[in-house]
Amino acid sequence: MIVVATDDFELYHEAVAELRERGVTFTTVRPDGELPDQTRVVVSAPTDGLSFDDVVHVVVAAEDARHGVEEALAALRSSDGRTVVGVDPGPRPGIAVLVGDVVVAAFHVPIADAVDVIRREIADAPDALVRVGDGDRLQSAKLINQLQEARVEMVDETGTTPYLGTGVRGMGDVLAAVNIARLEGEAVQSRDIEPTAGELQRIKNESRERSSDNRTIDETLARRVASGELTVDEALATHRNGTDGPDGAGADGEADDEPDT
């Protein structure tokens, strides 16, 4: 059983809310109180000054309560407690966070937010591992190249997206990320991708769709988007400000009003 033993009201509130949301059996005691016989994990704050030799002790600040509860649950289930983040890349990547064999968090966010989410989830996790699917070449390369500080594996994501029954549309990317997290991949530090003409055209088309003034970025900017150096919105702003040309002017200085072919 998990015991929350703290005088930190904020940690108490956050930890209890997290445990209740997960349907976990737990109890609470004062830091100077006696632990129940069934205690296997104690959660407390650094300010409580507690120390235990015979149970797992998770010391966590209130703002990291969710990660503390995840660590407690991993210990309770006798897993190895390793954090593995699976990513199904795309314009809105599915992200699944596993501690041992347990899925503790899931996200479905725009690609621009994905790296920040992943970094936050692995920030305090020892020996964390990020596994990125290889299906979307450009988006997976962007993610891998921006996660230089993390241990990253690239995973063959063939067959990782499950059949989706009625009522679960939109969950495919997240469920694929769970499966990717559970597959061994190849350790990588970077991924160099030469975008195809079709991929560059899709980026240019997206820029026109996102532009408020019917503007299409040029191929140079599209390549910078493909490499992850710029987002589409940043490329549009660069094109609009005319700062991408060789002499400080834009490639044509004007919006590209003719449709791309």
Image (tube, grey):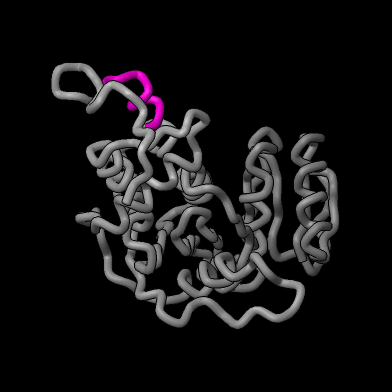
Please report the residue visible at 36 percent of the width from the left and 38 percent of the height from the top: 258
Q: Position of residue 50 (x, y in %)?
A: 67, 43
**Dominant SS type (magenta):** helix
Name the residue: 77% across, 66% down. Answer: 1
| Residue 237 shown in magenta | yes
Residue in front for this viewpoint, 140 or 98: 140
Quarter occupied by residue 149: top left
Residue 226, image x, y percentages: 30, 47
Nearer to me, 146 or 51? 146
Left or right placement of residue 174 versus residue 20 in this view: left
Q: Nearer the viewer, residue 94 or 48?
A: 94
Residue in the picture at 52% in, 46% down: 117
Drawn side of residue 181 relative to residue 57, left or right? left
Q: Residue at x 53, y 48 (%)?
A: 110
Is 74 placed above or below 160 here?
A: above
Q: Is residue 93 left or right of residue 59?
A: left
**Where residue 144 sits in the image (x, y, percent)?**
33, 53
Examine the rendering and report whether any part of residue 103 can be seen: yes
Res. 234 image quadrant: top left
Q: Is residue 79 visible?
A: no
* Residue 60: percent from left, percent from top: 63, 43
Q: Which segment is the magenta one?
A: 236-243
| Image quarter of residue 77 | bottom right
- Picture layout, residue 63 above or below residue 69: above
Number of numbered labels in the structure image: 0
Q: Is residue 160 above or below residue 117?
A: below
